[in-house]
Image (cartoon, helix red, strand yellow):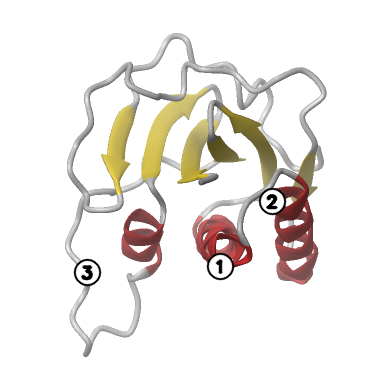
Amino acid sequence: MPERPTGTEPDDTSHTEPTATDGTSRTQPAGTDDTSRTQPAGTDGMSYTEPDDLRTVRTFVTERARALGLADARIDLLTLAVSELTTNTLQHTGGGGHIRVWADEGRLVCDVVDGGGPRPFGRAMPSAEAIRGRGLAIVERICDAVYTSSVPGGTLVRICLNLS
C-alpha cells in the first residue's frame, strides 16, 4: 500500500485492548466483538492516499456491501461512515490509509487503518454552531458498533452494521 506505515496490518491487533462503542456511544465489554477478530483470508481491500481517491473508496465500499447482502438504506449509512473516516485520515494524518470490507456472523465489517493516533470516540455531538468535529460522532451514531485499537504505526477503526 502506498504511504502505509510499516507493519500496520488490519488484523494485527492481538496485543491491544480495543475500545468499543455502539451507535449510542455506550461502552461495550471488550471481547463481545472486537478488533482482535481477524478478517477472512482474501478479504478485498483498497488503499487511498489523496482526496481524489475518496470517490473510488465510496464506490468500492458500496459495491462490496451490496455483494455481501447489506440493504440499500444501510449501504448509504456505511458509505457515509467510511467517507467520514477516510476524510479524517486525509485531513489529520501524514498519509493515506487502507480499507477492508467483509461479512462475519451476520454483520458487515469494515476496517479503516491509517497512520493516525487514537480516535476520540464517545463524545457528544458538537453544537450546531460548530464548524467542524461531527465526523466521528456521526460514525458512532449510524453504525451498529464502532471499535478502535492501536496497531503498529497507527490506528485501526472497525465499524459494523448488522446485515439483517
Q: Position of residue 7 (x, y in %)?
A: 66, 20
Residue 114 appears in the picture as rendered: no
Asked which secondary structure carries label 3, the reply is loop
Q: Position of residue 86 (x, y in %)?
A: 59, 57
Query: How busy is the neighbourhood of tag 3: few (under 14 within 10 Å), some, or many (20 plus)?
Result: some
Asked which secondary structure carries label 2, the reply is helix
Label located before the other in sequence (1 or 3): 1
> Residue 125, labelled with which disc?
3
Q: Front-most of 107 and 34?
A: 107
Q: Amino acid at mark 2?
A: Ala
Image-based side of 39 in relation to 122, left or right: right
CB under 8 Å between discs 1 and 3: no
Q: Residue under label 1, please give it.
A: 73
Mark in front: 1 vs 3: 1
Q: Position of residue 117 (x, y in %)?
A: 42, 40
- Quarter of the picture containing the N terminus is top right
Q: Amino acid at mark 1?
A: Ala
Q: Amino acid at mark 3?
A: Met
The residue drawn where x is 69% and y is 42% is 98
Q: Position of residue 73 (x, y in %)?
A: 56, 67
Q: Residue under label 2, please give it.
A: 65
Extreme residue in the top direction: 15
Q: CA distance from mark 2 to mark 1?
A: 11 Å
Q: Front-most of 40 and 136?
A: 40
Image position of 144 with respect to 45: above or below: below
